[in-house]
Image: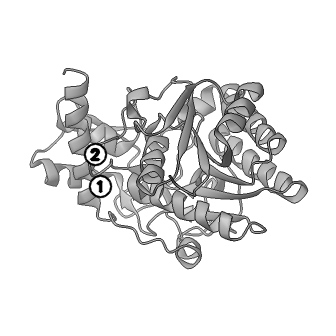
């Protein structure tokens, strides 16, 4: 038996959520997952975690799960994450990311859940004027995805001021890689993440990799991003949970990144190195809503949590993503 309370993980069958479940279970936390399986996979959920298929916008369902499992903390990953799609279909993002988060927070307050960890994003900053970007930099999202997440952060701050709930908003930079033990990884079909796309191309699942824009004000003209290994990110969530429990009056907002960036071409070069192949690159125009560079200032998370990234090497991130992509081919039979 464990003396740790049960944690509800929304979106726990998805990419980042499934890794958070792994990190929680590995650390001895009881876990229950709610996921509607729109983009997630039930097989990605650790066998020790309870699983409920359902929607986080369904307040009676969420309240029942919280009550039945004695949930004392929520990690909220469920939502939509594709920036260009958010520009084309903003109402989908305000429903899935903002309205459903509001419903989830209401269920948490109604059931007296004291701790809430929110999967936020560097897209809340928009096109930052400074780089690396700090948590107190202006929040000016340039797409509905970033705005839908920022609105949830604002809701959490208001709710924490009015109710006995503290929260941690973790603003992710570019998440990549896969569980080093091969238990989960980025599995969504048609994913838009660069490293996922590149390893698919390296294994012949795509004919080429599109490079969106070579005229950015960056060293090689391609977009620069701060890539963080998904297992390091999951570890940060567990440490953030412990911090919220230790100081119930304190809420936190922290960047999750390594504090250094790689360009699109540098990432593709790393994939070529790891695979000992050269993939075809096709130059295309810029995508809507893509800032030139997005690099984290991660000094706050390092000062606040005992967080020591274990997989910060780009080649390691690529190698884990590649190993997962090969395993995924076996799971799906080709």
Please tell me how crowded label 1 is: few (under 14), some (14-19), or many (20+) other residues with Cα within 10 Å.
many
Residue 203, quarter of picture: top left
Residue 115, quarter of picture: bottom right
Residue 285, horizontal then vertical, whole percent? 43, 38
Q: How many marks?
A: 2
Q: Is residue 233 above or below residue 50?
A: below
SS for dot 1: helix
Residue under pointer 2: 321
| Residue 26 vs residue 144, the one in the foreground | 26
What whole-number distance in Å separates the C-alpha atoms at marks 2 and 1? 6 Å
Residue 55, horizontal then vertical, whole percent? 64, 25
Whether label 2 touches label 1, CB < 8 Å: yes
The C terminus appears in which quarter of the rendering? top left
Q: Is residue 162 left or right of residue 150?
A: right
Q: Is residue 285 above or below residue 330?
A: below
Residue in view at x 67 percent, y 38 percent: 144
Farthest residue, direction right: 162
Please tell me how crowded label 2 is: few (under 14), some (14-19), or many (20+) other residues with Cα within 10 Å.
many
Q: Is residue 274 left or right of residue 287?
A: left
Q: Is residue 16 visible?
A: yes
Residue 81, quarter of picture: top right
Farthest residue, direction bottom: 303
Residue under pointer 1: 317
Q: Is residue 68 left or right of residue 289?
A: right
Residue in view at x 25 percent, y 37 percent: 325
Residue 10, horizontal then vertical, whole percent? 59, 38
| Residue 203 vs residue 289, the one in the foreground | 203
| Residue 9 vs residue 143, the one in the foreground | 9
């Amino acid at each position: 038996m464990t003396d740790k309370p049960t944690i509800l993980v929304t979106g726990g069958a998805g990419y980042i959520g499934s890794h958070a479940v792994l990190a929680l279970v590995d650390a001895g936390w009881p876990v229950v997952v709610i996921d509607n399986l729109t983009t997630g996979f039930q097989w990605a959920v650790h066998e020790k975690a309870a699983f409920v298929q359902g929607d986080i916008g369904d307040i009676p369902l969420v309240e029942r799960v919280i009550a039945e499992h004695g949930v004392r903390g929520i990690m909220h990953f469920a939502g939509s994450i594709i920036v260009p799609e958010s520009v084309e279909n903003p109402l989908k993002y305000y429903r899935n990311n903002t309205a459903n988060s509001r419903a989830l927070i209401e269920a948490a307050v109604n059931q007296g859940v004291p701790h809430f960890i929110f999967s936020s994003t560097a897209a809340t900053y928009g096109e930052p004027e400074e780089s690396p970007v700090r948590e107190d930099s202006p929040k000016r999202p340039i797409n509905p995805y970033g705005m839908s997440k920022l609105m949830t952060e604002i809701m959490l701050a208001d709710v924490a001021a009015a109710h006995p709930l503290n929260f941690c908003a973790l603003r992710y930079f570019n998440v990549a890689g896969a569980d080093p033990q091969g238990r989960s990884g980025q599995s969504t079909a048609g994913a838009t993440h660069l490293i996922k796309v590149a390893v698919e191309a390296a294994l012949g699942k795509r004919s080429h990799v599109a490079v969106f824009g070579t005229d950015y004000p960056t060293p090689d003209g391609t977009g620069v991003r701060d890539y963080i290994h998904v297992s390091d990110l999951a570890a940060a969530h567990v440490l953030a949970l412990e911090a919220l429990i230790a100081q119930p009056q304190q809420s936190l907002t922290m960047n999750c990144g390594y504090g250094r960036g790689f360009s699109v071409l540098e990432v593709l070069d790393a994939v070529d190195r790891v695979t000992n192949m050269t993939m075809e690159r096709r130059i295309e125009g810029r995508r809507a809503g893509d800032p030139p560079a997005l690099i984290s200032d991660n000094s706050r998370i390092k000062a606040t949590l005992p967080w020591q990234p274990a997989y910060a090497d780009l080649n390691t991130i690529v190698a884990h993503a590649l190993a997962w992509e090969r395993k995924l081919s076996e799971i799906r039979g080709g």
